[in-house]
Amino acid sequence: MEASILIGILTAVACFIAVRVKATIQFDDSLDTFMLHGVGGTVGALLTGILAYKALVPGDYFPLCAKILEDSGHFGLFIAQLKAVILTYGFVALGTAIILWILGALMPMGVSIEEEERGLDFVAHGEEAYDPMTN
């Protein structure tokens, strides 16, 4: 129980810091997708490897790490979680690249500078996000 609370607290702090860093470096991720899901999922997965109860993880669950898991506690589970995180990042990168390639073949993948300066709400929807007269 304490481990799950610790994972939640540390993951929330990591996500909060990531969102602040994103704002500081002005990274364009309007929905904080990576800052929340990417950072939160990565930190949560790695902390699970560190804080999981060894008694609940069968020794043969990670056949390549079973000896390490026996000898050094959570190190084997952490390595397995790290491998899963790296594999997931690769899978997501490849999937995103394929989706962008298909969409790029079907439609333009951005807006012109003029459209961006005018405002995407007006260009895409014919509406203003706010009243420019009050600004």
Image (cartoon, rainbow, N blue to C red):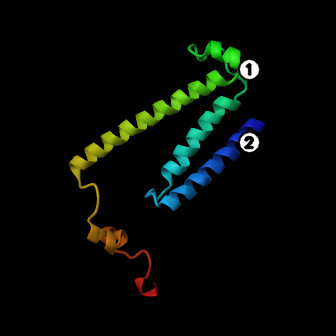
Residue at point 41%, 83% (across, down): 132
Total number of numbered discs in the rendering: 2
Residue 4 appears at what percent x and percent y?
Answer: 72, 38
> Badge 1: few (under 14), some or many (20 or more) residues near its Cα, within 10 Å?
few
Would you place residue 37 above or below residue 85 in this image?
below
Classify residue 15 as left or right of residue 9: left
Image quarter of residue 109: bottom left
Q: Please tell me the numbered disc located at residue 35.
A: none
- Given the image, on which type of amino acid does mark 2 rest? Ile
- Given the image, on which type of amino acid does mark 1 rest? Ala
Residue 60 visible within the image:
no
Residue at point 55%, 49% (across, down): 36
**Residue bearing the label numbered 1:** 55
Name of the residue lying farthest toward the front = 25
Classify residue 2 as left or right of residue 34: right
Residue 110 appears at what percent x and percent y?
Answer: 29, 58
> Badge 2: few (under 14), some or many (20 or more) residues near its Cα, within 10 Å?
few
Would you place residue 109 above or below residue 119 in this image?
above
Image quarter of residue 117: bottom left
Classify the position of the N terminus by image quarter: top right
Name of the residue lying farthest toward the right = 2
Name of the residue lying farthest toward the left = 105
Residue at point 37%, 70% (across, down): 121
**Which SS class for mark 1?**
helix
**Residue bearing the label numbered 2:** 5
Residue 85 appears at what percent x and percent y?
Answer: 52, 33
Would you place residue 62 above or below residue 53 in this image?
above
Q: Distance between the residues labelled 2 and 1?
A: 19 Å
Along the polypeptide, which appears first: circle 2 or circle 1? 2
Image quarter of residue 122: bottom left
Classify residue 17 as left or right of residue 121: right
